Amino acid sequence: MQKGIRLNDGHVASLGLLARKDGTRKGYLSKRSSDNTKWQTKWFALLQNLLFYFESDSSSRPSGLYLLEGCVCDRAPSPKPALSAKEPLEKQHYFTVNFSHENQKALELRTEDAKDCDEWVAAIAHASYRTLATEHEALMQKYLHLLQIVETEKTVATQLRRQIEDGEVEIERLKAEIATLLRDNERIQSTQTVTPNDEDSDIKKIKKVQSFLRGWLCRRKWKTIIQDYIRSPHADSMRKRNQVVFSMLEAEAEYVQQLHILVNNFLRPLRMAASSKKPPITHDDVSSIFLNSETIMFLHQIFYQGLKARISSWPTLVLADLFDILLPMLNIYQEFVRNHQYSLQILAHCKQNRDFDKLLKHYEAKPDCEERTLETFLTYPMFQIPRYILTLHELLAHTPHEHVERNSLDYAKSKLEELSRVMHDEVSETENIRKNLAIERMIIEGCEILLDTSQTFVRQGSLIQVPMSEKGKITRGRLGSLSLKKEGERQCFLFSKHLIICTRGSGGKLHLTKNGVISLIDCTLLEDPESTEEEAKGSSQDIDHLDFKIGVEPKDSPPFTVILVASSRQEKAAWTSDISQCVDNIRCNGLMMNAFEENSKVTVPQMIKAASRSPAPAPCVTTDGDVTFPSSGFAQAGDGDTSWICVAGGPRRCVFILYVQRAGGGPAVSVDASDGPLGEARVCLSLRPEPRSPSARSRRAQRSSLLTQPVLSDATRQKGGLNTERKPTRLPRTPLEAAEGPHGAHRAVSPPRTLTQDDPGDNQVTLEEITQMAEGVKAEPFENHSALEIAEQLTLLDHLVFKKIPYEEFFGQGWMKLEKNERTPYIMKTTKHFNDISNLIASEIIRNEDINARVSAIEKWVAVADICRCLHNYNAVLEITSSMNRSAIFRLKKTWLKVSKQTKALIDKLQKLVSSEGRFKNLREALKNCDPPCVPYLGMYLTDLAFIEEGTPNYTEDGLVNFSKMRMISHIIREIRQFQQTAYKIEHQVKVTQYLLDQSFVMDEESLYESSLRMEPKLPT
């Protein structure tokens, strides 16, 4: 299509006159001026693909013209009227002409008649010849394609002609050779005698016998070799291995057929039924019932075709590459397995509709279904992953260790088992939540502890509760009475943290008894209650030793005792074993936290632990009722340091001992914090002397004063009384210095601030003040800030953004709606802040042209992430790890090769902590064990709220409000509010926050990837 034409004045004048006379369309139109300030009325005339405009209909010379070839003409909406506008816009109709030429402004026109406007639009569109241009381009492509075909045919014809000529030459050569051989043969036959003698016939017989014997011996030898191999273990193993493969092929064919029936006999017909005028089922219900079964069918059809291709090349069976292709795509089973129970519930609910039930029975009656129901077909994918694992186990059992596929099949089995474990954990957790909700709905009074997702169901059953006598002993004489068995029967539910005791009312509903919710952390189990010999003689022989006692000592109420009687000794043993195990688990997990919170009130300086790069060692053995936990946070792996931390807890005493020693003869520091006789905290620091030169001693003393004073002052604020036996003079080099600037800039690093619940930090600055300080100020470069300073200020910013979210935005999934910016503005601001920080980190790494500078930036940001972990800022940990996984950073292979092994191990550890596997299982565990202040990852809670909103109805089957759903939502919002209300005690540093909020050097995703390619280009394939 031509972009322009050359015309002189004579041509323009001649064409203008022709347009005035024979133009297809003529009339007055208003044209917007070039500066877009006002409209000018012109007289327009359209001639073929040229649009002329004149000052008036009487003008003989056109004022200008437009080449319409390739343009687009469309109606345009009326602009908003200006305050000073005199013309009414209701009578104006606008349309625009957009040209395909570069740098040519669009032509904006208007008219007062709608019909006239439509006719002008149609005439200009017809004059653009876009349809002809498209057809011309298609014909040109076909023409070029035909030219290629003709050239290819010519090349092939030339090759065939050359082959025919070579064949003719070869034929002539062979004919000449045959003629020569025939002449030689005639000459030989003419000279040879034809009369054989008796000796020649005997020799022929001997040769024939010898040939027969040689053949017989050879066949016998081969037969022996083959029989020996057939009886060998290797051949037997190969036969079994081939049989496993053939069985797998048959099973895969059957599974594909089942999926084909599920999709073609149920899914697709129901989709068509949902689109009818009176649909028996909605599209949402169809999607909820069948989930991603169609995608699973396509995946296994591809896998089955690959298996058939491998069988065609039997006996050489190579299957490992098929599993390598299949493994990454098997993650789609997670969605199916996770929502399988929910899909069956939706199906059961839809069956209550008579039309749907009738239609479903019609589908199930088809011959392909073989009298199997839809539930049966929906259950088949649940067993496919375990079937693959069993098949691989059998394959590996019959695959020699030196086999070429051994390692690949072993890897495939391990990945499938890992996927199976993840799926099992998700299903178990979902089933546990559903079980807890079912029990909570049965209890009339409700039970909020069952809304805790970490509450795991253990067992349930009927037990008899025996009242205590006035002396606090068991009245064994009443154990055999029928009235006690009837009155004292209780429904007991044991969970990982609580024991619930209920009575059963009418209609199967449950009522909580007095003290019916027992916290296991306050319990002491006594399996054999004390009794005298006379009481034992009076008791019944059938129920002797079937009771057990639970002593409860709650913190906010007087202690009491619960006596329960089982129906058999086996049931008693099961109950007591499970209760004892739950109590031990709770006390073991909460020992360190209880020891610090309830007894000593000494806060551990978490940030010292954060700076270590070494992996965590194994726990030490407990002795004499004390628990010893080795720490990985007080030594740097590169210097050979070692460290221990010991926590000893008892009913009246808590001891915290920190011991740090350098392997090369360095100084040792010990900290002892214990409770005094009157509840006074005592912290003792002692330092072992180290023989060093005076210069080394002075340097260590200065660093020691910087590191110890804030910790002591925080401990003083906690208790108000602090006694130090010896004032420290110097400390070993702290691992926090490893997180300094990359170019060797050694700066004095301030130690981490100790955070307590007694100091809410209400006097800290607001987010608006920080943003206002950062505006219009040039930020200092990344190298001028230490990792500790960046981690603290990033934590301060994240928490200020997080605490601004009001609880009203968590209702109704507003963040997933089209008007999300209006309904949930603060959640959207939190998301934007997360993306801005992630982009800043990636840009900071990419903008370094030197590879060593990039390596230093990566290691420093990883150190920031580890410090944020110890500050309980898990949002920042995810911000940093997600930026490391961006394609522009992840592809820098040369850069990552220079990153230290300790840093890579630390990245793997942090990524595992914030991984979304198992519904953020590791992150939930960390949040459960940490105390505020904390910045959690908001996306985890939004996922939980969406799961509750979509998976739980607002009303019960009786039409009542579903308070269980409301309690679950309130439980999540309460946890968010708990983290929002407790602030960090971090001093604001303006220079660091200016750098974190500076977006001047931040690049977008495309620019990041282009810079990454420029630094490390792609290798040629």
Image (cartoon, helix red, strand yellow):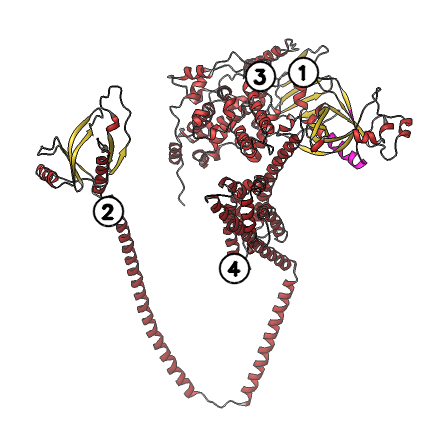
State the extent of the magenta-drawn residues as a range: 562-579
Q: Secondary structure at mark 4?
A: helix
The circle on residue 312 is 4
Q: Secondary structure at mark 2?
A: helix
Query: For residue 310: magenta?
Result: no
Residue 600 x/y as whole percent: 67, 16
Q: Quadrant of the C terminus?
A: top left
For the point 61% across and 57% down, the residue is 243
The residue at which mark 1 appears reads as 600
Report the amino acid beneath label 2: Leu
The residue at which mark 3 appears reads as 755
The residue at which mark 2 appears reads as 132
Q: Secondary structure at mark 1?
A: helix
Closest to the observer: 592 or 706?
Answer: 592
For the point 85% across and 25% down, the residue is 475
Report the amino acid beneath label 3: Leu
Residue 717 x/y as whole percent: 60, 10
Q: What's the distance in space between the residues labelled 3 and 1, CA to CA? A: 15 Å
Res 327 seen here? yes
Report the amino acid beneath label 1: Ser
- In this rendering, the count of numbered labels is 4
* Position above or below: 309 against 52: below
Q: What's the distance in space between the residues labelled 2 and 4, CA to CA? A: 52 Å
In the rendered structure, which disc, 4 or 1, sits on the residue that comes first in sequence?
4
* Position above or below: 194 against 368: below
Residue 906 x/y as whole percent: 54, 30
